[in-house]
Amino acid sequence: MTNAKKLIINGSGSYPGGEYDKISIRGEGTIVNDVTCSTYHVYGTCEVMENISADSVKIMGEAEFKGNVEANKTLVMGTMMIDHQAKLKQMKILGMLEVGERLSGDTASIKGSIAVNGDVEYETFDSSGGFEIKGLLTADTVKILLSFGNSTADEIGGSKITVKRGAWLIPFTNISLSKKEGFLTAKVIEGDDIYLENTTANVVRGNRVKIGRGCQIGLVEYTDVFTQDTSSTVKTNTKR
Amino acid sequence: MSEELISKKDLLDMARISYGQLYRWKRKDLIPEEWFIRKSTFTGQETFFPKEKILERINKIQSMKENLSLDELADMFSPNLTDLQLSRVELIKRNIVSEQVMNMYIEQDQGSDLFTLSRILEVYVLEKLLQSGEINLDEGKMLLQVLKDQGAQIKQKNCELVITRKLGVSSCLVVINTEGLYFERGTKVVTTVSLMTCMEEIKSKLV
């Protein structure tokens, strides 16, 4: 970036976009046009009216993006809201992320929660928080640890899909960390290797399907292996 | 334009690929979103694909993935206008455009001798239709004008170019993601060209 400048907003202010090196917002800031920068840190609240592309984004406070967002590294400890598409290559969500359209990238690690109104596409998707996806969740490996609340996705697809109940307080016992358990609801789950716990789904299709405890599945279609825990209900299962 | 559909599991069986692969290709945009047709069946929700298109696409992917990375393949399939530029001489040499059509295009376009991908597409479509004898020179000019005006629409989308004629008067339109297209009696559809297919043809000639 040639002659890129720093933008630091400590009080409140509204600034034009353009090219910056570092942007740091500690008070309340608004950026009115498209903006490109290397790092974008928000400790207060901010609003970007158009698109943003950044190398690293850190949100400790609250940030609202009215356009698209593109970032290499994203860390959200506060709240991040994106109205349109988001391409977050490596993202770590400890707080809350809301996306209006499609969310895509390479690795996702979710300990907080996300709500997406479109499809979610990652290479690895690792969640121990909650999510609400109104579209297809697809990743090469989907790993979901249900520790609280009700997570939902319209469809889940990938090669390896693992859904487990939340972490135990004392290992190798059944005393769970929190009183509440998490649940997953999806219409369709498709993958090569599937392991499910605490899941409600209409259809599960895969090569090797293992149904653990606490599941309610309408139909399982499998090619190689099918096992089922006695505490789960599977209405029908067919080998093809 | 009803096509024969194939369900996802039949497709996986037939093409001998796994769910993981199919989803990976979808993520890489090797298979366009519009081909995923969701329907509810008596066994629950199922996804269907246009049979001919998807089988052809998977064939292509499988035959080329040994030489090209998935990202390169994605570039090839997407009609996204990359920053490729070719000179006029190069285009003629690579047999994308004949010399006469090129001269006509330059005359009409008044542009430089360096061709971006969008201009290559324009001249390629012109070449294709003029050579097949389906349109005449005037219609060619009209076609160029439509393509130029709608350039922004053509990116990424599944576009078709339709040329119709009625009582000797011709007209030219670009349609995006159509289900069907119907005209009044007496209208003759001269030709429909899928711009996406054209783009793939060009790209396969460039590689």
Image: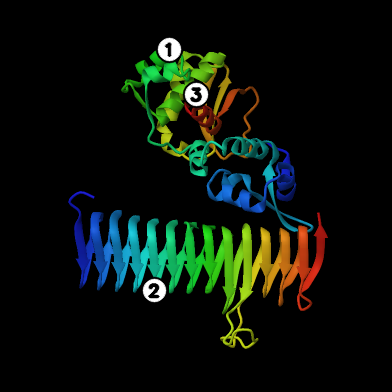
Q: Position of residue A10 (x, y in %)?
A: 20, 72
Mark 3 sits on what residue? B125
Q: Please state the chain letter of the residue tagged with numbered disc 2 in the rendered image.
A: A
Identify the disc placed on residue B3.
none
Q: Position of residue A66 (x, y in %)?
A: 38, 60
Name the residue at 21% across, 68% down: A9
Which element is circle 1 on? helix
What colour scheme does the image use?
rainbow
Inter-mark Cα distance, 3 to 2? 51 Å
Q: Is circle 2 on the same chain as circle 1? A: no
Question: Disc 1 or disc 3, which is closer to the eye?
Answer: 1
Question: Disc 2 or disc 1, which is closer to the eye?
Answer: 2
Residue type at mark 1? Glu
Residue type at mark 3? Val
**Disc on the earlier residue, 1 or 3:** 1
Does residue A181 appear left or right of residue B75 in this picture? right
Crowding near the residue tagged with mark 1, few <14, some 14–19, many ≥20 C-alpha atoms within 10 Å: some
The quarter holding residue B142 reads top left
Mark 1 sits on what residue? B99
Which element is circle 3 on? helix
Mark 2 sits on what residue? A77
Which element is circle 2 on? loop
